[in-house]
Image: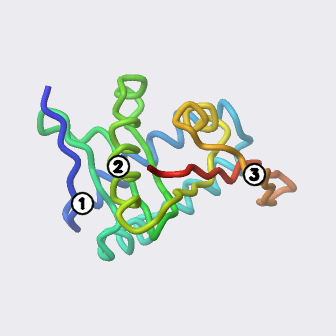
């Protein structure tokens, strides 16, 4: 299998949007109430993803020419890492994180991210530690709980 992590182009918008939305709608309902799932769906709108693509912040992971995942970062903050649900658990998230951390390490000594509940343990295995437990109220009194995490980069 040939893996290639490359910069996303405007023409990749629909693909990136679909990966993010499929992943949110498949995984997050197991951890969060509907209001939080909706919050994430809205946060990762086409408009927000397009803005990040136009700023050169979004990458896509191609496996044998098929786009299976996406990553995004701004400065040293990893802001979006998603793998298409049927490709999860195969190491593709690790591949995306390796690329993001490598890019960040060229200018920064640490990487930070806001980890959703489904992802916390994956990031801990990568050497991230929680620096803050965060709560963010969304609609209908539902609360988004997440961890702000940080890792020292070599």
| Numbered mark located on residue 130 in the image | none
Residue 84 at what x, y percent from top left?
37, 36
The residue that disc 1 covers is 8
Alpha carbon separation for disc pair 1 and 2: 9 Å
Secondary element type, mark 2: strand
Residue 16 at what x, y percent from top left?
33, 53
Residue 18 at what x, y percent from top left?
36, 48
In the picture shown, does residue 34 fall above or below 59?
Answer: above
The residue that disc 3 covers is 144
Residue 1 at what x, y percent from top left?
14, 25
Which of disc 3 and disc 1 is earlier in sequence?
Answer: 1
Residue 48: quadrant of the picture: bottom left
Alpha carbon separation for disc pair 2 and 3: 23 Å
In the picture shown, does residue 5 fall above or below 39?
Answer: above
Secondary element type, mark 3: strand
Which of disc 2 and disc 1 is earlier in sequence?
Answer: 1
Horizontally, is 109 left or right of 137 in the view?
Answer: left
Q: Residue at x 40, y 37 (%)?
A: 93
**Contact, CB < 8 Å: mark 1 with mark 2?**
yes
């Amino acid at each position: 299998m040939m893996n290639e992590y490359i910069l996303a182009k405007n023409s990749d918008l629909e693909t990136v949007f679909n990966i993010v939305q499929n992943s949110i709608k498949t995984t997050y309902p197991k951890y969060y109430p509907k209001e939080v799932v909706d919050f994430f769906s809205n946060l990762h709108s086409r408009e927000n993803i397009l803005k990040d693509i136009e700023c050169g912040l979004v990458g896509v992971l191609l496996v044998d020419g098929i786009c299976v995942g996406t990553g995004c970062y701004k400065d040293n903050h990893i802001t979006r890492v998603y793998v298409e649900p049927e490709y999860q658990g195969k190491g593709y998230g690790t591949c995306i994180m390796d690329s993001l951390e490598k890019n960040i390490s060229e200018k920064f000594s640490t990487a930070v991210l806001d980890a959703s509940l489904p992802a916390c343990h994956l990031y801990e295995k990568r050497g991230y530690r929680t620096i803050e437990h965060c709560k963010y109220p969304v609609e209908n009194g539902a609360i988004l709980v997440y961890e702000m995490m940080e890792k020292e980069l070599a």
